[in-house]
Image (cartoon, rainbow, N blue to C red):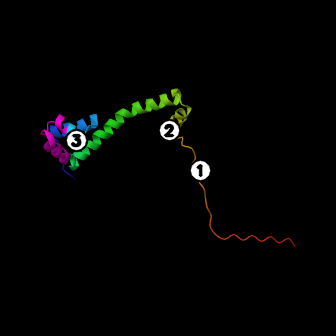
Amino acid sequence: MLKQIKLTNKQKCLVDTIVALGCSIKEASAKSGYAEGESGRVTASKTLRLPHIQEYMQQRVRESIGLNATKASNKMLQLSSSAKSEYVQLEASKDILDRAGYKPIEKSMNLVTGNINVSIDLT
């Protein structure tokens, strides 16, 4: 069993800032209390490569996506009924049905290779 490594407040702040704002490492390092300028960016960049930091970042991204999924779902429903373009309405409707498990049957083409001989005896 792997030992869980505890994150510092500065490391948590760095990851949380990047996930919440989608900003650059340089901006996040400045907001998270790392050294000013290039040295802070380099330190933050090295920090983000650590396995336990990457694991925490993936966890935060999953949480963020989960929280925003309801907004995306609502937008898709709005587009399917009120978009000005019929194409957008159709694509939104197809996407909703697909995600609900009502995917259309996939068309497939079966090719058969080999020799076929036909003999017709009319006698």
Q: Position of residue 61 (x, y in %)?
A: 30, 40
Does the image show residue 4?
Answer: no
Q: Position of residue 106 (x, y in %)?
A: 57, 49
Q: In the structure shown, which secondary structural element does the residue marked by tag 1 occupy?
A: loop
Please identify the residue farthest to the top as the structure is shown.
82
- Confirm or deny contact between disc 1 and disc 2 (CB under 8 A): no
Which badge, 1 or 2, is on the more N-terminal residue?
2
Q: Is residue 86 magenta?
A: no
Callout 1: 10 Å neighbours few (<14), some, many (20+)?
A: few
Callout 2: 10 Å neighbours few (<14), some, many (20+)?
A: some
Q: In the structure shown, which secondary structural element does the residue marked by tag 2 occupy?
A: helix
Please state the extent of the stretch shown in magenta in the rendering: 28-47
Q: In the structure shown, which secondary structural element does the residue marked by tag 3 occupy?
A: helix
Does the image show residue 91?
Answer: yes
Q: In terms of image quadrants, where is residue 27?
A: top left
Please identify the residue farthest to the left as the structure is shown.
35
**Disc 2 residue type (three-letter):** Asp
- Confirm or deny contact between disc 2 and disc 3 (CB under 8 A): no
Observer-side mark, 1 or 3, equals: 3
Read off the residue under disc 2.
95
Q: Is residue 3 above or below residue 122?
A: above
Q: Left or right: where does residue 50 sit relative to residue 74?
A: left
In the picture, the quarter occupied by the C terminus is bottom right
Q: Of the numbered discs in the image, which one, if any, rests on residue 25?
A: 3
